[in-house]
Image: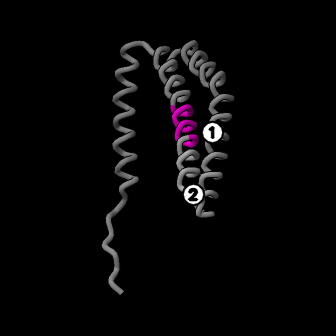
Amino acid sequence: MTPDQIARVDAIFQATLPELRQRKEELDRLEAKLSQLIEADTEEATVVRWVDKTEAARGQLNKVRTLMLMRMRQVLAPEQRVRFKSLHEKWDMERRRADAGPRREPSSR
């Protein structure tokens, strides 16, 4: 990446960061409340409303993140996008492999 591209990508990130933090804090707050309601055996209708609120907040956070990434991608030249896609696919495959980890049979005690 050129110095100009780095500056532009960083500017996009810095401009988006406050909203990402705000939406993440809201999601964390809603998830905590939802967990409390479930633990307290709250009636299902109330839990369903909180699930809806929580998932809407999760969707908003993902939307902000996706738009940020799209704007960052637009800074890249077409050949850089191809290279980035290749690197991302490799990273994703390695991450999935690491997440799967070694398969162990449960012990029979």
The earlier-in-sequence mark between 2 and 1 is 1
Label of residue 43 in the image: 2
Nearer mark to the viewer, of 2 and 1 = 2
- Secondary structure mostly seen in the magenta stretch: helix
Residue occupying the point 51% across, 34% down? 59
Locate residue 88: give its quadrant.
top left
Please determine whether, in this image, residue 23 is positioned above or below residue 45. Answer: above
From the top left corner, tell me how far across and down residue 37 is, in percent.
62, 57
Residue most extreme to the bottom: 109
- The residue indicated by pointer 1 is 24
Q: Is residue 45 above or below residue 103?
A: above
Q: What distance separates the C-alpha of mark 2 from that of mark 1?
A: 27 Å
Q: Residue at x 66, y 40 (%)?
A: 26
Give the residue displayed 54% in from the left and 38% down from the top.
Answer: 58
Task: Identify the secondary structure beneath mark 1.
Answer: helix
Above or below residue 69? Residue 97 is: below
- Comparing 25 with 56, the one in front is 56
Kindly indicate the quadrant of the structure image that contains residue 57. top right
Type of the residue with mark 1? Lys
Q: Quadrant of the C terminus?
A: bottom left
Q: Give the range drawn in magenta.
A: 53-62
| Amino acid marked by disc 2 | Glu
Q: Residues within 10 Å of mark 2 (few under 14, many from 20)?
A: few
